[in-house]
Amino acid sequence: MIYDAAIIGAGLSGLSAARQLAAQGLDVVIVEKSLGTGGRAATRRLELPEGGHVSVDHGAQFFTARDPLFRQQVAGWLDRGVCFEWSSGFHTWDGASLLSPDDRWKEPRFACHSGMSALGRDLAEGLQIIRGFRVVSVDRNGEEWVLHPMGENSMESIRARTIFCSAPVPQSLELTGRYISEDQRRLLGLLSYGPCLAVMALYKDKKHHPSWKGVQVRNPGSSLSWMAWDSTRRDREHLADAAVFHSSVDFASRSGLDSADGKQLAASEMLRDAARIGGEWIEHPSQTSVHFWRYAIPLGEGVERGFLRSEENPELYFIGDGLQGGRIEGAWLSGFKATQDYLLS
């Protein structure tokens, strides 16, 4: 079978693109190396030793809706209970004081009661997704693209007339960079990402009720950039409360985080810094889990149109939050804009 379009990656940009194309009656397939959807809009299920579990958002923590197109999408999610307005602003730590939310920066921040992975599940509904398909190479064969899976397994190569690469730009360039012009390679090569170490911490002592939902850490000397009381996003109580701590880019860029011991030592330092902000008890969770995001934060404004179409092979698109300035909204818009360009061409 030859698909009208194949999309590499089931993150929010890839899912957004697939929904627009499928709505026009096109044969679309998404190939995804993992077993989930939604990319960094991710929720982890932490199993408790005594039984039961706690769901924790360890990737994207919330999202805004500023563009009219994305507002329409969010309105639909709100109507169907996929998301809710979690907060209108966050506390700030300046290195000395915990400051209340500033009225100047108030706007709706949305989250999901069941976890941010609900966004990916909703967008993926009804789409054809091949999970566990890691693309090892991409070839151009006449009028077709051929996506080859990694390893000796039962998966067959995917053939499509058009492909949308929604993986982080460095990975997409590695797969398809030879099919764009030198100027476009140079442009995409300027796009970079900062890493982030996420620490999920559980607290069984239910007496702690922080005054903050989220804290933006503005102290350059801290290992942290963000801390959240994750339990305020849930619509039911768990056997333990949960907090999430995100590192700064500089902290996550240091050496040693490629080992389990290195991650745990870094997590301990982050908990110490969090305790200075929120209280000594934060340093002593009953359980922790750590995740390293290599391509967590796009470090630029992206490209002018929010996506890139190959000048030499117009049936090739690059999409993703890195091309649209970051954030969940940017990811969704990048996929949406690219497909509008495709459909009008």
Image (tube, rainbow, N blue to C red):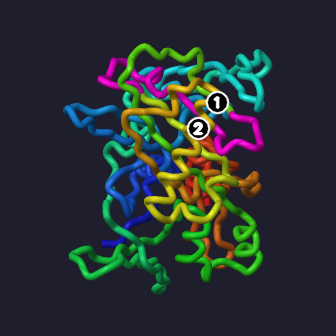
Q: Amino acid at mark 2?
A: Arg
Quarter of the image holding residue 155?
bottom left
The image shows residue 80, relative to residue 173, as above or below, that is above
Q: Secondary structure at mark 2?
A: helix
* Residue 82 visible: no
The image shows residue 221, relative to residue 8, as above or below, that is above
Residue drawn at x 60%, y 69% is 170
Q: Which residue is mark 2?
A: 272
State which region is magenta.
217-241
Coordinates of residue 217 in the picture (x, y in percent): 69, 34
Q: Which disc, if any, is residue 276?
A: 1
* Residue 226 visible: yes
The image shows residue 73, relative to residue 149, as above or below, that is above
Let me know if residue 228 is in the magenta part: yes
Q: Nearer the viewer, residue 258 or 142?
A: 258
Residue drawn at x 49%, y 67% is 163
Tell me the quarter of the image containing the C terminus. Answer: bottom right
Residue found at the far right of this picture: 104
Coordinates of residue 107 in the picture (x, y in percent): 68, 21
Residue drawn at x 26%, y 82% is 152
Q: Amino acid at mark 1?
A: Arg
Coordinates of residue 168 in the picture (x, y in percent): 57, 62
Residue drawn at x 66%, y 79% is 312
* CB atoms of marks 1 and 2 within 8 Å: yes
Q: Which disc, if any, is residue 71?
A: none
| Numbered label tally | 2
The image shows residue 70, relative to residue 180, as above or below, that is above
Quarter of the image holding residue 108?
top right
